[in-house]
Image: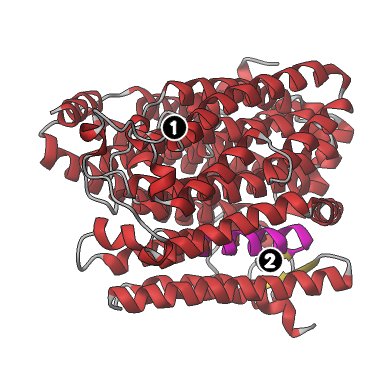
Amino acid sequence: MDVMNLFRNYEEAVAMILFGIGFSNLLMQKNLIKKIIGMNIMDTSVYLFLAVKGYIEGHKAPIVVDGVQSVEAYINPIPSGLVLTGIVVSVSVSALMLALTIRLYRRYHTLNLDEISTLLKKEEKS
Amino acid sequence: MSFVQNFPFFSILLSLFAGPLSSVLSGKAAKALNAAVITIAGILSAATLVFVLGTGESYVYTMGHFPAPWGNEIRVGVLEAGMAVFFCIVMLLCMMGGAAERLLEIEEGKQNLYYVMVNLLLCSLLALIYTKDLFTAYVFVEINTISACGLIMIRQTGRTIEAAVRYMIMSLLGSGLLLLGIVFLYDLTGQLLMDHIKIQVQLLSVTGEYHIPLLIAISFMAVGLAIKSALFPFHAWLPDAYGYSTLSSAAILSSLVSKGYIFLLIKIFYQVIGFDLIVRSKVINVLFVFGVAGMLFGSVSAIREKDIRRMIAFSSVAQIGYIYMGFGLGTTAGMIASIFHILSHGATKSLLFVAASGLTDVSDKRRSIRRLTGAGYRNRLAGVTFTVGALSMVGFPMFSGFISKILFAQAAMENDGKMLVTVVALAVSTILNAMYFLKTVIRIYTPLPADGGEEEAEGNTVLRMRDCPAKSLAMICFIALNLFLGLSSEPIVDLIRKGLDMFA
């Protein structure tokens, strides 16, 4: 194990740190909006990781402009495709989460999930 | 290529297109379309099952006829086709059993939206069963999550929306980990199709390179899917989601949605990593520990619960624990037991939800167990059905739960290190199960006291079978399914064994 590897592959390291930040935000924040932000950070960090892994130093985007060129000229297009698919998924999930948040806010006038739980319990008793 | 081989693809596409189509139909038409789609998907899957049993080997279907590294593929074997048939049957019965509740609990004019969700859920379940591509699996996992969330929140009360939010948060944590695991695996191997990854992973394991990243990828995927299927410490969302959503949602969520994720995990174990490597990686030991813990804690929480729906929901935590404990044994016998338990739990839990709603219907819709005194006399069929479900869960011979318990115990005998823990956990969990299920059965067959029971009896009604024909039919079919699984377990276990041989 070489510590210098962490600095040499700093993009991957950053992606993993971001993943940790997003994950713990989604898990531990009480505020729903902050949770959603955490979720987006988490997802985006995975896309960063994918994009970094697909990039090859000095190669171009895989779009053929002047006739057919050799494979050597391009970066790997599959990770980019995966990132696009992933973005679509996370957009729809964020939209759903935000819609649910609006529903809860209209009903209970707070974004704090714990407070909402307490209010619910009170509602049930009365 | 035989025409039958197209059927899995047809069933996925059919349910996929039926979803958006339902959004422009009226509630009634959407309901009919949904029932038709589930039935047709079931028949198509059954035809595929017969075909695969006939040829005796699995086949790979290339979508759009692009060959392997470029195109997307699905893979069909006995286990996949059998699971698809089972899912379709249970889903049809759940929809039938909860039809009356849906009319009451879903807002007028939004009925058809419910069927959009159910159709998409069926599509994603079928795709999870058949797909051979890991990233496709991820996408369908998300579709599954979103439509399951829709099923929870379609009944608009504060409780269900909060439950839906909690469900989404847990699921998103799970799918984040799953995605990261898949991405790691893609980086290590450069492949997305399951069998291509497996070849590369086997090579890596021989050379011993990238040992730690591989381990991390496996554990991320396993933990991610475990979170999504509500393994013990991650079950906080489950009782609310199952307890307060409309009846058919609760039944479908408990018996199918979590099973879809578990089936994907089995696929990852066998087709992506290879079972021997999984056993050596010790990831299953973690699953084993949490499975056993879930078996005990789920049951203890269920004993303390006073609401019958929530009690059944907590019992799900225990049953999911059984399934993961079977994985944790690390033998083929353990795997067979787990897969049988997927079937057994799927058939029994939805039965219990439907029966419990039959019992609360005659008790003024109150769901506390105390209120159900004598409910077994007021709605006889529901009483009998609940008793069957309870006995099956406890592990009474003749019912499916008994077979899965005996399979688990037999599988435990093959594993010296974990034998004692497994057998003791099975015994303790059976006693705990008996405590809360039999307590409820005794309660529903205790006649109301003749004097001083007016307050208890307020709002009680009597329901006969002809008062709720759809629910009664669903309950009778569920009992038949349960007895079928329990009495003809031999051929089913053979089928699972054959499927697992084909699987790898």
Residue that appears at 37% across and 35% down: B373
Residue named by callout 2: B73
Indicate which disc, 1 or 2, sits on the residue closer to the N terminus: 2
Query: In this picture, is B54 found above or below B413?
Result: below
Under circle 1, the secondary element is: helix
Q: Is residue B140 visible?
A: yes
Q: Position of residue B282 (x, y in %)?
A: 76, 24
Q: Position of residue B213 (x, y in %)?
A: 68, 30
Whole-angstrom CA distance, mark 1 to mark 2, is 52 Å
Looking at the image, residue A85 sits to the left or right of residue B70; the answer is: left
CB under 8 Å between callouts 1 and 2? no
Residue named by callout 1: B443
Q: Nearer the viewer, residue B502 or B208?
A: B502
Q: Is residue A12 visible?
A: no
Residue bounds of the magenta highlight:
B76-92
Q: Nearer the viewer, residue A124 or A108?
A: A124
Q: Chain of mark 1?
A: B
Looking at the image, residue B196 sits to the left or right of residue B321; the answer is: right
Q: Chain of mark 2?
A: B
User: Which amino acid type is marked by label 1?
Assistant: Arg
User: Which amino acid type is marked by label 2?
Assistant: Glu
Looking at the image, residue B358 sits to the left or right of residue B264; the answer is: left
Q: Are marks 1 and 2 on the same chain?
A: yes
Quadrant of the frame with the N terminus of chain B = bottom right
Q: Is residue B103 magenta?
A: no
Q: Is residue B84 magenta?
A: yes
At label 2, counting other C-alpha atoms closer than 10 Å, the crowd grade (few under 14, some 14-19, many 20 or more) is: many
